[in-house]
Image: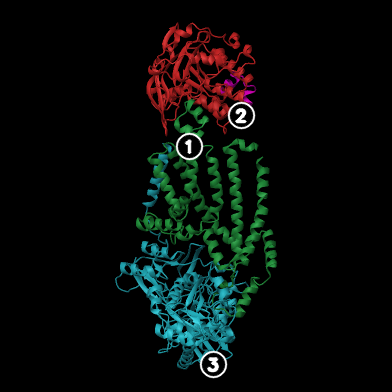
Amino acid sequence: MSGDPVLSIRDLVVRFDVPDGTVHAVERVSYDVGAGETVGVVGESGCGKSVTVMAALGLLPCPPGRVVGGEVLLEGQDLLRLSPRELRAVRGKQIAMVFQDPMTSLHPAYTVGDQVAEAVRAHDAGRSGRAAWGRAVELLELVGVPDADARARTYPHQWSGGMRQRAMIAMAISHHPKVLIADEPTTALDVTVQAQVLDLLREVQQETSSAIVLITHDLGVIAEMADRVVVMYAGRVVETGGTTTIFGDARHPYTRGLLACLPRPELEGQPLPAIPGAPPNLVDPPAGCAFHPRCSLRQGRARCVVETPILADVGEGHRAACHFSEELARTPLAAPPETAARR
Amino acid sequence: MTLGYVGWRLLQVVPTAAAILLIGFLLIHLAPGDPVLALAGESGDAEYYAFIGDKFGLDEPLPQQLLTYTGRVLQADLGTSYLQGRPVAEIITERVPATLVLSSTALVLSSVGGVLLGLYVAARPHGVRDTTVSSSVLAVYAAPVFWLGQLAILVLALGTGWFPVQGMRSPGSDAGGLAALYDVARHLALPALVLASQEVAAVYRLTRVGLADELASDHVRTARAKGLSGRRVMLKHALRRPLVPVVTVIGGRAGHLLSGAIVIEVVFGWPGLGRLLLTSLQARDNPVVLGIFLVVAFAVVLANLATDFAYRWLDPRVRYQ
Amino acid sequence: MKARALVIVLVFSLLAMACADTGREDDGEAQETTTTTTSGEPVRGGTVVAAIDSDPGQLNPAITTSGAVHYASELMFNGLVALSPELEPVPELAESWEVEDDGALYRFQLRDDVTWHDGEPFTSADVKFSFEEVLLEFHSRTKASVGNALESIETPDDHTVEFRFTEPYAPLLQQLDVTEAPIIPRHVYEGTDPQENPANLAPVGTGPFRFVSYDPGQEIVLDANEDYFKEDLPYLDQVVLRVIPEEGNQVIALESGEVDWLFEVPGPDLSRLQESGEFEFIETSVNPGGANCIMTVSFNLDRPIFQSVEVRTALAHALDREQFLSRVQFDQGRVAEAPIHSGIPFGHAEGLNMPTFDRAEAERLLEEAGWVSEDGGTRTAQGVEGVPDGTPLAFEFLSFPTFSQYGELFRAQLAEVGAEVSLQALEPPVFADTVFTQRDFDTNVISYCNGTDPEIGVRRMYISSNIAPIPFSNAAAYRNAEVDRLFDQAITTVDRDDRSAIYEQIQEILVEELPYFWLVETVATRAYTTDCQGFGEAGHFAETAFCEQ
């Protein structure tokens, strides 16, 4: 990563007020995204990876959500301090999002072409309806939709899952965003289609030179796509680093645990390893390190309970939030999954 | 799809109308009392009553009366009113415009008003706005419409003099054109408002609840992520689907409204079908009553048809079911 | 927000509409307006708006006795005579008449200066036609009374009409006004079915006002008849009859100035209107729908309970009629002192032995008749003829829904003497069917209207030949040969005093036998704005009226 980051999330804190109490959904999360690079944000469901970006774009329902503190800098401008109108100018134009389930993410009563054209006109009001439609068809062709003009006149429920996601991507790139945030873009699709969509994302990135924030719980996708990885757990960032580094030399027990869970052909026939325990209740998070109840590295040490580990450098561009991360440095890790070889 | 489909649906009116006619006919004739009293007044002698009964065929056996009547209807002859000696079709046609004006105005007011209120509250739910609007709408709905009407007259007509007390036009007015339009509009305001107040509640609640659901949906999230303005998101993306149940409700009520809001018409002296139905029933002027039943049947079918088309427009997935 | 803007626009437009003038439009054809005068000097011009209860449906008063039609149409027509408040005939279409053959022949000289609203001259042929082809076919009252006695109508010339009767017919002159026998134009109706002639919706008459428009359900607009045969009349330019079905709203319309004349003020609103000082009132028992009406309780004499005259007398004594008058009628009218209404002076008998309100007497009579009560509860029969022992003194009371208050008072008052009454309100067609056709009732209350002559509305209640499945016939099924005979005699007795004596005899018998019990004579209180005066009581109410400008 060279130069200043295009997107910089700093110490973001987001809470939710629910009847049972306050959920500490995002707890001082910080990471940067450089221009043109792909950052993979990985973690379990509920770890806050989606909430972070939604809060950054002001898309959280607010009640019950609250952004309590932090900054989100887009090329130096703090998005959290923008007025609603200013923020709208950013959304879809400088930062665009692709969501997980394209069926529900598209409006069922309007044609796909209409919705893409709407994205075009959202930040280009001067463009006529016909011109916007033309641009929409162009975009759809770009993302590989065959017979785009005719298909655009049909409705989302007449499109397949993969095609729908392509349309979502078309909408997202319509204004050459600086950052494209893809929140679990392939989770709802089957495996073969997944590969196509990921390929598409890569192509698109080459076209538009956008940075991509790829949010997923699937390490395989990370291995394939990401330049750098951000690992989150219980609302916090626990490790960041280059993809190869993370996969080869993870320094946080949680990351290790995740990697160990990946199915490997040589382990065929044996039960899949898993991380014992369950993610913490974020209304009442444990003191100290959020992972300590499940951590095999802790071995009863009190420091993990008493002191919250900070994200500290453990190598070149590599940071981990663990008191005992050096101990992991000496421990060998299993070989990274096969898919990495495809790069 | 359209023309053939419409034709097919309209054809479905026939069995409906036939059933309504048959049932209506039986109900009216099996009910105690007959038109002779209203026709002949209170002072006739036996000969006179026999004469009246004979003239209108009131003494014939029921099946025969039904047959005669059906025969006439099939020739598009709705018969002659006992009381007025005029063709039923003529009498009903005279009253239809007044009812249409009143009910369509009330329909528009309540639909638009209900949706607007729903939008207004959905934009900021669970607050003061929500409580005020919801309880007001409920209170108005719960109040008996007769009472509301009288209250409106006492306060807004007699009290402030802003609106006339009753009727559709000023007494003796023979104004034309724009002045006439204005006159009718002033007379229309209160009855339409009171009638609309009874319908607003359902529309409002459905809109509000539907909007609340939609605003939490994924496609609204996408719309926001695209950078669309709050207004556009609300009106174009969020409002569309909740309108489906709203249209259902409106369509269901439209047929009812067209039959004449009887109470409103009586309270405000509005010369519509509702009052005609009431007075004809009381006098047992059967041809008129049956004629109105038929008109209402048509109205309901038409309203259903319109609702159907509205669905298809609102949610294209319906087409393929 | 868009919604808010819309609401503001709506509110403003409502306000804008409301702030406009609420006054009525003036008729463009108004005559020259003279300055107002303070005394009774008639002023020309102006419009009177009158409220009527219901939409008439059509405007021919000769084919129906419906009140709605008559209220709406009588201003456009005339009868041969008009009736003074004392029910004496005064000239109208007929300027003079002679009675010959002891009342078997009536000869009328008609005015020769009368034209129909369409310009055609009025002649005796119109009278003959109106009676023979229309009134005697369709007008139930005239058909029932005049129709039975009439032999023929002759027209010796264009301005003379002769009514010949088989026997002397006394009441003719009371049955020739615009309510009982309106004259309609032969040249319009000849050869058509009077009930379906389109002129019924655009009438041609001779009356003080001519037809302008009929807006069904809304109003009937009438303009002054410039060529009206009564000199100088009418003073008004226009009369608008406005249909306002809700009587409460009629009052509101009067108070707001939208309406100038009410035919009937509802009891509860009367005192308020009187106190405001802005209105004048006329109390009258004459109505286009039925004159001189008495709220009458009928006993079904076919039922064993009511076959004893003591029981009937007892029940009569148990009724406090003053209470009916004050509670239900708000003191409008009077307690009925005779079976014939006091509005028919020669018929109404004075000093009759009408049962007074006397509970003790009621109870005594009931006990005597065999209706005993232990511990003050409902009485039961002990040795009553035709009634098994132990039968409770319980029976039903039927009425129109509008008269249900009578039922409630009736029940309450009779409960005091140990009679248990259950109430049933039936709407008119059902009531008529149940009471007159099925004869399935114990007691009821009916507004029996006597009319302008006892022959019209009294006779039918008491003669045995009128026990028939016809509304408002002899509900009690009273049979008394002497009464039948007396009525037959009365109808042929032309001399007023002689007739009066016969009616007195009849009423004495009726009060003894009590087939019915007469509660209150009802009146209507007309109300009108003090800006206007000169109104009449009934159909031609606006003929001599005028208003300050």
Q: Mark 1 points at which residue?
A: B212
Q: Is disc 1 on the same chain as disc 3?
A: no
Residue at image x 53%, y 69%?
C427
Residue C394, horizontal then vertical, whole percent: 50, 77
Residue placed most toward the observer, C310 or C247: C310
Q: Which mark is residue A153?
A: 2
Task: Left or right? Give the position of C48 relative to C456.
Answer: left
Chain depicted in green: B
Measured in 3D between alpha carbons, the distance from the residue under mark 2 to the one under mark 3, in whole angstroms, is 97 Å
The magenta region covers: A135-154
Q: Is residue A141 magenta?
A: yes
Give yes or no for contact between labels 1 and 2 (Cβ–Cβ under 8 Å): no
The quadrant the N terminus of chain C occupies is top left
For mark 3, give the secondary structure: helix
Task: Left or right? Give the position of B255 relative to A22.
Answer: right
Task: Left or right? Give the position of C296 relative to C166.
Answer: left
Measured in 3D between alpha carbons, the distance from the residue under mark 1 to the one under mark 2, in whole angstroms, is 29 Å
Residue placed most toward the observer, B246 or B306: B246
At label 3, the amino acid type is Glu
At label 1, the amino acid type is Ala
Residue placed most toward the observer, B134 or A108: B134
The quadrant the C terminus of chain C occupies is bottom left
Measured in 3D between alpha carbons, the distance from the residue under mark 3 to the one under mark 1, in whole angstroms, is 85 Å
Give yes or no for contact between labels 2 and 3 (Cβ–Cβ under 8 Å): no
